[in-house]
Image (cartoon, rainbow, N blue to C red):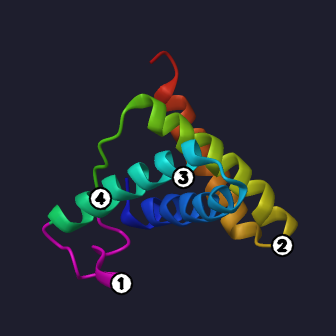
């Protein structure tokens, strides 16, 4: 997936982890940290690491994130919830990107 798409996932999961930490949801916090750490590791290993924003590869570079299916399902749920939040705040571009990514990942996970 493009780095720009992963950064939307990373930011969405970061928000979820912040809320979960306040709410005492240790499962969500642990899952979110694991998902984000996988992205950071893939970014650090990318041949163009540092050529994009904040040390990431360029936004249009492809990045491969290795996660177990359960973690990808967590991401799908968080993107769906993030889309609702984005819509409520009027950030329709982020909502649309979240919905697009959710649909893409949900289709990839079908049958797994």
Q: Which of the two discs, 2 and 3, labels the residue nearer the N terminus?
A: 3
Q: Element at badge 2?
A: loop
Q: CA distance from mark 4 to mark 2?
A: 29 Å
Q: Which of the two discs, 1 and 2, labels the residue nearer the N terminus?
A: 1
Q: CA distance from mark 3 to mark 1?
A: 23 Å
Does residue 57 belong to the magenta stretch?
A: yes
Q: Residue at x 73, y 50 (%)?
A: 81
Question: Looking at the image, which is closer to me, 40 or 105?
Answer: 40
Question: Looking at the image, which is closer to me, 76 or 106?
Answer: 76
Q: CA distance from mark 2 to mark 3?
A: 27 Å
Q: CA distance from mark 4 to mark 3?
A: 27 Å
Residue stretch rendered in magenta on the structure: 47-62
Question: Which residue in the structure is indicated by mark 4?
Answer: 62
Q: Position of residue 22 (x, y in %)?
A: 69, 62
Could you classify mark 2 by the number of other residues whose Cα lies within 10 Å: few (under 14), some (14-19), or many (20 or more)? few
Q: Position of residue 63 (x, y in %)?
A: 29, 57
Question: Which residue in the structure is indicated by mark 3?
Answer: 29
Q: Element at badge 3?
A: helix
In the rendering, which numbered label is found on residue 90?
2
Q: Residue at x 76, y 72 (%)?
A: 91
């Amino acid at each position: 997936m493009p780095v720009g798409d992963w950064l939307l996932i990373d930011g969405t999961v970061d928000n979820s982890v912040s809320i979960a930490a306040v709410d005492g949801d240790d499962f969500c916090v642990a899952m979110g940290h694991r998902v984000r750490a996988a992205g950071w590791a893939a970014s650090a290993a990318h041949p163009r690491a540092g050529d994009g924003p904040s040390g990431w590869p360029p936004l249009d570079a492809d990045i491969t994130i290795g996660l177990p299916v359960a973690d990808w399902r967590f991401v799908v749920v968080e993107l769906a919830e993030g889309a609702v939040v984005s819509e409520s705040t009027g950030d329709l571009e982020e909502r649309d990107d979240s919905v697009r990514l959710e649909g893409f990942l949900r289709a990839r996970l079908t049958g797994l």
